[in-house]
Amino acid sequence: MLTIYGVHRSRASRNIWLAHELGLPFRLEPVMQLYRLKEPIPAGVTHTRSPSFLKVNPNGHVPSIDDDGLVLHESLAINLYLARKHGGPLAPKDIAEEGQMIMWSLWAATEVEGHALAVLQQGAPREAVDALRAPFAVLNDAVSGGWLVGGRFTVADINVAEVVRYATPARELFDANPRVKAWLDACQARPAFRKMWEDREKEPA
């Protein structure tokens, strides 16, 4: 049984979405980000600095997974692993596609995520929005065929979409890059995303 450590309102959402896409049964072990908790921390709440969780991930971040004894951290890497393990259309069909999926996942982490989080958390500061203009233009060209890799929806789309989602308060970026908007809308229209999002909405903000 796959165990996912985290909550829906964390980067674990990426792994939960993929698990739903793949039809994988999993157990969600709730681990709250410590910065979201107020003192005194309620009894029985496991958080990212709880000793029990630090035994799973000594970095003290969510998500982590335990897949029949294999423990992995880093949400984007977890998704690449799960897609590769379980195969199907979301996974790479050859080494070239695998390279592309890794490339786009790392691109999202290095070119987009930091600035997109600033947009989400700080109300779209001008410097963060400006820093995203070039990456959004790159993505706008990349999804001209509908999806990022192989002309079909894959794990690369999940990984990148979940990072780009943070930038949605900066509507001007999406207005200037309509293919990005259409692509993100198509990703988020998928039943597996909707299932994840409905469960996310049930969690405390």
Image (cartoon, rainbow, N blue to C red):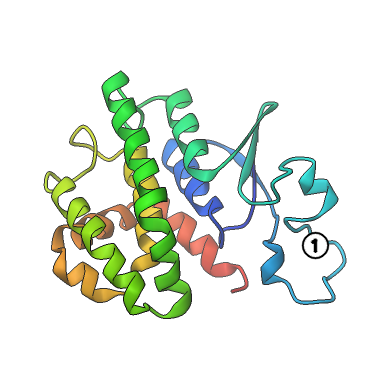
Q: Amino acid at mark 1?
A: Val
Which residue: 70% across, 54% down?
A: 30
Q: Position of residue 166 (x, y in %)?
A: 40, 65
Quadrant of the image containing the C terminus: bottom right
Give the left or right position of residue 104, taking residue 33 as reference.
left
- Asked if residue 2 shows in the view, the reply is no
Which residue: 28% across, 27% down?
A: 97
Q: Spot the residue most to the top.
A: 94
Q: Position of residue 98 (x, y in %)?
A: 34, 26
Which residue: 36% across, 29% down?
A: 91
Q: Position of residue 13 (x, y in %)?
A: 51, 53
Q: Position of residue 183 (x, y in %)?
A: 22, 54
Residue labelled with disc 1:
45
Give the left or right position of residue 199, taking residue 189 as reference.
right
| Of 111 and 85, the residue lying toward us | 111
Give the left or right position of residue 108, taking residue 8 as reference.
left
